[in-house]
Image (spheres, coloured by chain):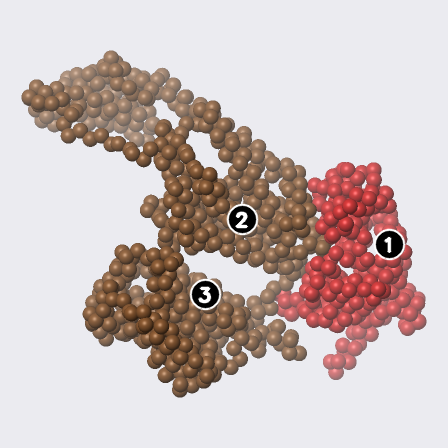
Amino acid sequence: MKEDRTVEVRGLVKTFWDRGRGRIQAVDGIDFVCEPGQVFGLLGANGAGKTTTLRVLATILEPTEGSATVDGHDVRHDPEGVRRSIGFHSASTALYPRLTARETLRFFARVNGYPEARIEGRVDALLDRFGIRRYADARVDTLSSGMKQKVAIARTVAHDPPVLVFDEPSVGLDVVNALELRRIVRELRDLGKAIIFSTHVMPEAERVCDRIAIMHRGRILSEGTLEEHRARTGLHYLEDIFVAGLEGDEEDDLGDLS
Amino acid sequence: MRRIRPLLAHELRMLARDTRMLLIAFVLPLVVFPALILVMRAVERGEAERMEETVFTYAVSGEREDWTRALLLAALDEAEAAATDSAGPRMRFEERQVEQPDSLLAAEHLHVVVEGFGAADAPGVRLHYRASSDLSRAAASDLAERLERVRGARRDSALVAAGLPVPPDRVAEVVPRNIAGAEREGGALLGLALTPFVLLLMLTGGSIAAVDTLSGEKERGTLETLLTTGLARADIVRAKVLAIVLLGLVLVAVNTANLLVYLGLGVIELPEHLALSLTALDTLLVLLLLAPLTVLVASALLLLSGRVDGYKEFQIAFFPVLLVFVALSVAGMLPGMELRSAIAFVPVAGIGVAVREVVLSQHDWPFLLITWCATAGAGYGLTRLTERSLSAERLIGGGAVDPAELQGGPALFPRRVLRWFAVIWALFFTVSLWFGEALGIRGQVFVNLVVLFGGGTALMIRVYRLDPVRVLFLRAPPPAAWVAVLIGAPAAYLAGIGLAELIDAYVFPVPESVLESFGNVLLGDSLPMWQLLLFLAVLPGVFEEIAFRGVLLHGLSARLRPVTLCLVVGALFGLFHVALFRIVPTAFLGVLLAATVLLTGSVLPAMLWHALNNAIALVPAHLGWVDADTTAPGWAYVAAVAGLLLAFGILYATRRPPPGLGRPHPSDPRAAAAMS
């Protein structure tokens, strides 16, 4: 059932209406696929449409047009199925301060439909894998930010979902914690998870992502492995590739105008 | 239930770990309540001591000072005062011999000035005091009481001396005797207080839970986490509502127990001779009635919590909500309020009245059911609204707004039309309630129909830049429609009466007095025939149709399918006819008229139908051909139904629905998006 494990986005459009700015085309017809055991990177500046795309995938937002399926579930018709199949992690999704780490993991495993009989075993395994056993029974609001970060990732994978979504996870992390995060993401990939990873940090994308899509103003400008990007542009560093892509896009716009 | 159990357990655990919540919801009532009682008792005791310690000073002035002084001495005679069972503290008085006693009283050097007045054979005294000083006021009232006693005794002995054959206090004696019995009296008191008591505790406890469980989650950023789990939005809302309800109920239980403990200890005293006996059935019934109330409160609080950003805004928005609920819940305290009235349809208020009646063992089953459904329905509606407001676009994309709102005009109108009618309804009621009598029947008709319906319609057309011809369905109907109306109007009138009688017989009877007074309202002004037709048939036919079957029908047509559309327009039309028993027949007429407009694509046949209907209701009675006791034979109702079917058969066969109805307006951005 390989195709069921993929994330597939086809012609996705998301339009917002803002009181001040009027119509905003946050995502403007994008397509991509993410396979199991792959980290798919969405690289773009702030406002490129990365977060909106991921929120549509997580069924927080409804697509205006187009389709997206996660593990065989359609975001429009089976949002609960989609959410059970993904773990969503972002810098803005917080932990419950009044729960302990153990209770947090237990709760998220349970509400995501993880088999009840296996929850305790799963929680124990996670506590060990993420090295949080020592403070498993301390309330989350007493933990340091690095510990919280680990608990947050552990809760994202609590129900062992086939698909993981990381929305700018390294925002606000110090170097050590950011490195730790990358290590965990690679580990999860090796376990066969399909991982969507958005970032605006070029070196991070270079190190973590197997495929990279450069997003700008709601569109995907180019997509491929780092090597493919290099071959296409003749440039070595992702930063240069990214800038070149953006410049090409601006020129297209000028062409449209004339 | 199984799906929401983990979330409910989670919510309750979170609440139980919120120290602020525990403090406000439990510690405060358990500590502050007794503390308040203790303080009040201490104040009372202190006040009594002060009264006993103070030496109250008075001066005598005016005519016949010696007589006045003697009277005062008699009144202040300790032995006599002790003989009476005065409950208050014993107060001591002393006379001051002063010049200008009035100015000393004003300067607070004296408590009372006693002034003699009147003729020598009928002397009296005036007590001067300052109501702004509690000591002066207490002194005057104590003195007045004592003087009154002396006066009574003197009058009695004078009467006896003059030869009264019986003791004076036996002349035309009046003895009130209460036959209600302690239990009924206790029941009446409980019935009044129970709903507001439960409601207040639900509101205070529930608000703390609600603000933590939704606004708090939003503020902490955990709501987004929750929304990305496998839980359905509906389950999230249900678990949260249930958590609020449970917390509220625990609070009710704790405070009731608290109250009972203080009653048991005698710290609080109830009025004497009260007792309570509720049958098991009535207790169950009361709990059943209060259940939808708790759900309604919980979902209202949750909705509020979802709509605002954070704790502070919640506090600001909570106060008006509290006021509305409390105002509704005290409806049960209104004297003479019966459940068998429009109040049954008002959420919360109906429950208040129903609880009072059940506690007194009155069971008006159909209306108990109606009021239960009204409150439960409102609770369900609010829960659904909360679910919708959890659609995360509103929560997360702060700038996300309804595209129609930005465009305004015709695209926005369908979303605003109900608000307009709510305002018109409120104005309509205010006019009828407060200015009805002053305006008279013609004035009322003019204000309601021309100003409110006509003016409101014109305003809506202007504000939303609507096309009047399209919105008001101003076009020629198929000619056969006129024939259908001539058959349908009398048939529908008779069928409507039949329907009302069926309801009267099988659902709930309409009191005779209501029917009679309504007849008087319509005919009491004895208008000449042409005015009767103009004000009560032609004008309603024109203005009610352009409002209800024009703008309202058009506005709702974008959101509802034809059958639902007719039912909703009819029901709203019925609600505009204040009296309870008129709602059903008028709603019935409203449904038929809406269907007529949808089938003919024109409002004109509906106008004729409406005018004819009113004329049929008025003219025969006005000319004295029929009276209130006239009833139609059974076959007439059968014929009426047949006529109605024939009329709609003709309308359906020649139907010419309005073009483009039900499709989104071309300028609606979603329609534009779908087309592109």
Question: What residue did someone put label 1 on?
Answer: A188
Q: Is residue B278 left or right of residue B61?
A: right
Mark 1 is surrounded, within 10 Å at the Cα level, by few (under 14), some (14 to 19) or many (20 or more) other residues, namely some
Q: Secondary structure at mark 3?
A: helix
User: Which chain did the image draw in red?
Assistant: A
Mark 2 is surrounded, within 10 Å at the Cα level, by few (under 14), some (14 to 19) or many (20 or more) other residues, namely many
Give the label on residue B80, or none.
none
Q: Which amino acid type corresponds to the residue marked 2 in the rendered image?
A: Val
Q: Which amino acid type corresponds to the residue marked 1 in the rendered image?
A: Leu
Q: Which residue corresponds to the image point at 17% horizontal and 23% vertical from the top-left?
A: B151
Q: Which amino acid type corresponds to the residue marked 3 in the rendered image?
A: Trp
Tell me the mark number nearer the camera, choosing from 2 and 1: 2
* CB contact under 8 Å: marks 3 and 1: no
The extreme front residue here reads B635
Mark before the other along the chain sequence, 3 or 2: 2
Question: What residue did someone put label 2 on?
Answer: B295
Q: Is residue B371 left or right of residue B27?
A: left
User: Which chain did the image draw in brown?
Assistant: B
* CB contact under 8 Å: marks 2 and 1: no
Q: Secondary structure at mark 1?
A: helix
On the same chain, marks 2 and 1? The answer is: no
Q: Is residue B655 left or right of residue A83?
A: left
Position in image of residue B166 (x %, y %): 11, 23
Name the chain under label 1. A
Question: What residue did someone put label 3 on?
Answer: B420
